[in-house]
Amino acid sequence: MINLVHKLLGFWLPKRRSSGNRRAAGAEKQSAGPVGNSIPAPKPAAHRPSGRMIEQVEGRVMFSASTPALPRPDHVVVVVLEDHSYQQILGANPYPSSLAWIVQPPRYNTDPYLRSLASQSAVLTNMTATAHANQSDYQALFSGLAPQAKPDKPLIQNRAPNIASEAIANGLTFGGYSESLPYTGWSRGDKGDYKQGHNPWVDLKNVPTADNLPFTKFPKNHLAALPTISYVVPNEQHNMHSNTVYASDQWMAANMQRYAAWTRKHNSLLIVTWDESHVSSNNIPTFFYGPMVRPGQYAEPASHYNLLSTVEQMFGLQPTNQAAAAAPITDVFNTETPVGG
């Protein structure tokens, strides 16, 4: 019975899978966006293009050939979660069947904090992951590398330019924070709930080992000490890979809520995205939260490469690898020059 229910529901039970190629299963439609309001809303935008409502973004130019101005935050934190689609995380009705109540109490399949945060954010409703392999997706987010033929093998282009190497070369700082990493610089593979396949910087020899950090080094009580650019990867129990959506949601509330609130008075940005989903479209949730963000839903197509290009260009960095051909995401931000203006 449980096996049958599991097949019907797909994402309601924690998933176990290998770190190699994974096939997407089942298509789904996007639905209405996030709900909730437990955190304060950002201040109203100082400038919004005349006649353009935030909720009506389908007709906007998201990627402009002239690349409108991007904000330059003091700090950016990118959190990467696992294996869920937009519908599953931010959809209006993520429960496909009342059978979910039989498998688990409803709260274990809900995400109140993430929905609340997203309700104050710029939400990409048509964001697509790169592939169905850890190495391909995480490298797309970090270095912009195209998927290699055998993504379950060691990274071939292990000195490829990436957001960390470019930031450091330009006098900025980087920190990659992995929950349950045994110690700073660890590169000896999986250890407990830490999975090296979810840590893209460890495979690149031009990223200092001192920047490969356990999450215990994340300065939650002294956020001004954060690097310019940080990536945060929760462990298998907290990234939606091997435990419930609710467990990940509560981890985010406990560990990212303070930073999210801090961004609003410190010109900083939080980005939450996913590596992939298990639907045929590979559609994933992604949202931006911070004082420079125009909250709303944005339906233009976007990818991991567009996201990487956006963060790199915020700091005047040369977009790396496939990100060089991916335009930055611009219309989610308040800028002096309006998009398309």
Image (tube, rainbow, N blue to C red):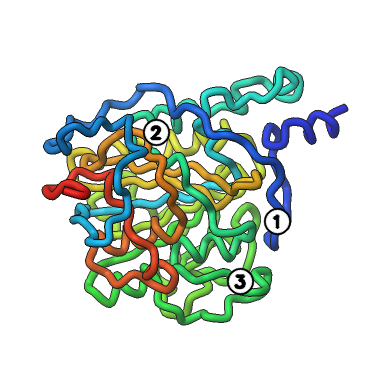
Q: Quadrant of residue 333?
A: top left
Q: Residue at x 40, y 27 (%)?
A: 116
Amino acid bearing label 1: Arg
Instruction: Say whether marks 2 and 1 touch (CB < 8 Å).
Output: no
Which one is in front, 279 or 89? Answer: 279
Q: Residues under labels 2 and 3: Cα distance?
A: 36 Å
SS at badge 2: helix
The percent position of residue 15, horizontal first and vertical second, equals 70, 43
Given the current orientation, which residue lies at the most extreme front position? 59
Amino acid bearing label 2: Ala
Residue 288 visible? yes
Q: Residues under labels 3 and 1: Cα distance?
A: 24 Å
Say left or right for 257 vs 333.
Answer: right
Q: Residues under labels 2 and 1: Cα distance?
A: 28 Å
- Vertical comparison of 299 with 44: above or below: below
Q: Residue at x 50, y 31 (%)?
A: 90
Mark 2 residue crowding within 10 angstroms, few (<14) / some (14–19) / many (20+): many
Q: Nearer the viewer, mark 3 or mark 1?
A: 1
Residue 237 visible? no
Image quadrant in which the N terminus is located? top right
> What residue did someone put label 3 on?
188
> What residue did someone put label 1 on?
22
The percent position of residue 205, horizontal first and vertical second, equals 47, 80
SS at badge 3: loop
> What residue did someone put label 2 on?
118
Q: Residue at x 49, y 71 (%)?
A: 145
- Vertical comparison of 102 with 179: above or below: above
